[in-house]
Amino acid sequence: MDFSFTEEQVMLRDSVARYLGKAYDFDARQALLRSGAPWSKEAWRQFADLGVLALPLPEEVGGLGGSAADLVPVAETFGEHLTVEPWAFALTLAGGALVAAGDNAAARRHLADLASGASTGAFAYDEGRGLAAPAQIAMTAAPSGGGFVLDGEKRLVFGAAEAGFLVVAARAAGRAGDVEGLVLLLVDPHAPGVALTPFRTQDGRSAAHVRFDDVAVAGADVLMRDAHGVIAKLISDAILVLAAEAVGAMGALLRITGTYATTRKQFGVAIGTFQAVAHRLADMKIAHAKAYASLMYSTALAEAGRLTARDVSVLKGQVGKLGRTIAEAAVQTHGGVGMTDELSVGHYMKRLLAFEVLFGAPDYHFRLVGKAA
Amino acid sequence: MNIEFGPELESFRQEVGSFLDTAPTPAIREAGGKTTSVFAPFEQAMAWQKILHAKGWAAPAWPREYGGTGWSVAQRYIFAEECRKRELPPLLPNGLVMVGPMLIELGTDEQKRKHLPQILSGEAYWTQGYSEPNAGSDLASLQCAAVSDGDDYIINGSKIWTTLAHHSNRMFMLVRTAKTGKKQEGITFLLLERTDYPGMDIRPIVGLDGFPEQCEVFFDNVRVPKSGRVGAENDGWSVAKHLLKHERGGSAASPAMLHSIARLREAAKTTPSPFGGVLADDPVFERDLGELEADVLSYRHFEQLAISGHPMVRDAAYPSMNKTMSSELSQRVSIMMTRVSGIETVPLQLEALTVGANVAPLGDDFDLTAMPYYLNTRATTIYAGTNEVQRDLIARTVLAAHR
């Protein structure tokens, strides 16, 4: 057994960390958000130069064919810096769907643009108050000729307003709860009938709710039928990458809070000398250790092609729950200043809480773990 | 990254498994099933040690030259895991895990020659004399005194929480040999070759689970030879810290927890739910069980990282984190067991729990052990440094990282 990264993986992580350390500290991030830009074009260009955009994509389309162990350390670094670029959503989810479509011509075109950084894509999946399981997809894609007509709404589509293409997961047959009848469709965000409501997320990302009114999708843009297995695999990949981001954010919060408790004085002494505070710090470190261990173990399982749905539920539930534990402890330890927008602590909290509810909240995943041995 | 143990370790697992399937006697198996503590029933644990010793497997962590197996950390983990899967009683740790490894590092040649073979064979069983009525978490405040008298020390005072002292024929202990300077600096580490010296009085303490696992030991002018001293006079604190080190790393606590979870999940399939059907299908139960199992699995992942030699094991907080996680998770597992067992936890069944008593339990074996296990497991967050002390140590590393 070996849970260490290769020299190449460490080098890539370090060069990403070096760039972010220089150009993407917390003040730079806040200035970026104040500018109204959805994310940093400059950072995206750097990611392209460093190979981070090509990393998750297969070699046939100009990618680097990165494995789980390649993605995780980079994502952890993104989490430490609270990056707002839609890497996981555009590459892992939207890009992953295009890859799964095989030799679809339109998909290949978009993939080349993704790898080079020329454009991005978005994955339209969630509905209502969120979809823990792909089988719950309800939005309809009515068969029409060789293609489909889309009607309904997708919620919380990350990077939709800036995307060159949308991948939409919809239901062509059956009803919510059925594993059968799901399709993945390629949709032009500027097509007639597509209406976006863009917004900033609590954790600084750009996202949109997307309405579809009689949106015609041609047969050539049907990426996949019987898509349940592929969608589930995409979500599983995204959970691993986003969990790595979350663990990176947890590590940063632990460090920041440790520093604060060492330097902040009340009653004439550093607050970390009070046992109630010290024990909360210990609990933060334990929470981080558990989340980190499950992330590393899951990464190694994914490398070996052995990551099961149950393993993913353990990871998602644990990182979600423990992320909240750390975030709330960090705010409490910082006291009043922890409540302010100008400190990074609350922004880490919002990133962790967003992770907690995406793709099934801990209650859902824990119940799955509890069901079956 | 590589998640596999590899073919060599997998064939090692097979070898271990086939031995463990055949070697234990029925009484040893019964004791394993009735183990509701980290300390298995004494007689059967020692019988099992004898069998393992004959095979050369009594001390997995010892170097080969002292009669150990020379196994790697991963092999030891696999061995422990296979033992837990089969519900075999764990060997009693005081000699094999505590005194033995400490002597290998710090003992004189004579001490090693005298004690190590007897620890391996089980001829000698050691009790630990550390805590005192007024020295628990604050161990360095201990007052049990040893006064030098020629080639001997004369001991006066008392020790408490001396696990299984009533079954032990050896004792290692900390005594106060100086009352000046820092309290850590006046402590000496002694090995007692008998537990029946004149003036020594051992009184068992009945625990919450109804069994006398712990004892109190009184010393009234007990004369012991100085040859039993480990390290220099007044340097016992560093010996004790050394000994603590041997309880760290390569732990294999998660297999037992996962085994208990599998048992309680099975039991829940026949436990009626107040809402109809069975508890196993109750959504709240499923969720709570899943949350617990996921947390145990994270701890298991932490263990796996440790046995792979991940740099985190060099973190000064690692032993305390390991102890805190494993003790609190085992308590939560025990709570879940009593939750499934429900009213079956209420009958007191000391006889049915006694190995060889031939008294049938009032319910099934799961119900028999749930409550005693719960009660005994309350000790895990108290012994070996309360979890409050562990959290102090962990927090120190969070704060020190920024000084």
Image (cartoon, coloured by chain):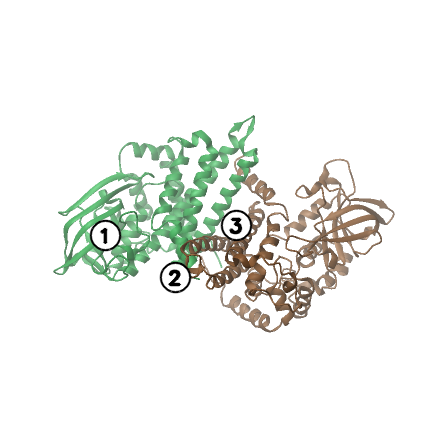
Chain colours: A green, B brown
Q: Do the residues labelled 3 and 2 touch (CB within 8 Å)?
A: no
Which residue corresponds to the image point at 73% horizontal and 63% vertical from the top-left? B117
Which residue corresponds to the image point at 76% horizontal and 53% vertical from the top-left? B203
Among the two numbered marks 2 and 1 on one chain, the one whose residue lies closer to the N terminus: 1
List the single residue furthest toward the right.
Answer: B150
Q: Hey, what amino acid is under mark 1? A: Val
Element marked by disc 3? helix
Pointers 1 and 3 within a single chain: no
Q: Which chain carries label 1?
A: A
**Disc count in the image?**
3
Looking at the rendered image, the disc whose residue lies closer to the viewer, 3 or 2, is 2
Element marked by disc 2? loop
For disc 1, the marked residue is A167
Residue B311, labelled with which disc? 3
Q: Hey, what amino acid is under mark 3? A: Pro
Res A197 quadrant in image: top left
